Image (spheres, helix red, strand yellow):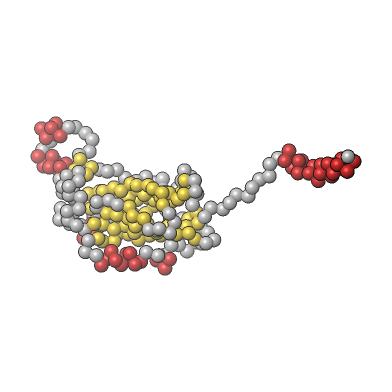
């Protein structure tokens, strides 16, 4: 009985510091640094003259929130700079770009890549892709974006993108506008009814609403989905598309 008592006493003595720790303030767990990824995308257009001809498109599909997005950091900044643009030497999708160039069905428009940590989707910012138009460039109805640079001083496509996490998963959001050829069927912007406009507006103005003379008709692709690192993803639109590759980076 005495030996049992001693054993209990020793056990209590050895465990008492652990009880004290448990009773005190909880120990803090060091924050796990986020994983880093390279984000690379190629934007290309569908060159089929009939692309989207059966669709009805809004005359004004809206624009991405460019001002709220952050520009990519210069590529010559330190490697641990978040959202640092990567130079072509780091591109992994050159082969896809070349295949698109050789294709008679597609035309590559934009190839860009950057490095970033993946943090919660609700906290990570959008980044800017391409350059928005400064002004609407005049063009004939037969011109194409590549022939007229129809987006003024910008590129034929621009927008914003975001890589974040939702729990243990990666999530990618994309909001792009492509300046393409005129659409055969358009939805007029909100305003007076078509009947009222036809009565009160000159015939030329009415025709401009139905079939604008400018070659730059904006088409918008706005999508978001869960993705897997290392797997090629495709964002589809009748007028243009996006290839995306997100690759883990070792830090």
Q: Which residue is located at x 33 percent, y 55 percent?
A: 234
Q: Which residue is located at x 60 percent, y 49 percent?
A: 31
- Quarter-of-image position of residue 17: top right
- Residue extending furthest front? 1
**Residue 230 seen in render:** yes
Answer left or right for 88 relative to 146. right
Q: Is residue 250 above or below residue 122?
A: below
Residue 126 rendering spot, x and y as whole percentages? 42, 49
Foreground of the two, 143 or 164: 164
Q: Which residue is located at x 12 percent, y 42 percent?
A: 207
Q: Is residue 196 above or below residue 13?
A: above
Residue 192 rendering spot, x and y as whole percentages? 19, 32
Foreground of the two, 32 or 153: 32
**Residue 132 seen in render:** no
Answer left or right for 119 relative to 56. right
Answer left or right for 188 relative to 235. left
């Amino acid at each position: 009985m005495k030996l049992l008592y001693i054993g209990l006493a020793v056990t209590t003595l050895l465990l008492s510091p652990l009880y004290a720790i448990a009773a005190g303030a909880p120990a803090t767990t060091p924050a796990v640094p986020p994983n880093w990824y390279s984000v690379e995308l190629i934007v290309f257009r569908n060159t089929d003259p009939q692309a989207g001809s059966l669709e009805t498109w809004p005359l004004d599909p809206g624009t991405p929130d460019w001002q709220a997005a952050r520009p990519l950091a210069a590529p010559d900044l330190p490697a641990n700079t978040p959202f640092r643009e990567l130079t072509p030497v780091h591109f992994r999708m050159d082969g896809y770009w070349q295949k698109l160039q050789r294709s008679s069905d597609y035309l590559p428009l934009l190839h860009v890549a950057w490095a970033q940590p993946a943090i919660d989707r609700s906290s990570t910012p959008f980044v800017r892709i391409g350059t928005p138009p400064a002004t609407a460039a005049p063009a004939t109805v037969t011109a194409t974006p590549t022939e007229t640079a129809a987006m003024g001083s910008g590129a034929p496509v621009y927008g914003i993108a975001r890589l974040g996490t939702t729990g243990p998963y990666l999530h990618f959001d994309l909001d792009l506008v492509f300046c393409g050829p005129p659409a055969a069927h358009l939805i007029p912007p909100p305003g007076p009814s078509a009947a009222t406009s036809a009565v009160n507006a000159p015939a030329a103005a009415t025709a401009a609403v139905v079939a604008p003379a400018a070659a730059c008709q904006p088409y918008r692709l706005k999508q978001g989905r869960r993705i897997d690192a290392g797997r090629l993803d495709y964002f589809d639109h009748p007028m243009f598309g996006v290839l995306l590759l997100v690759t883990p980076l070792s830090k």
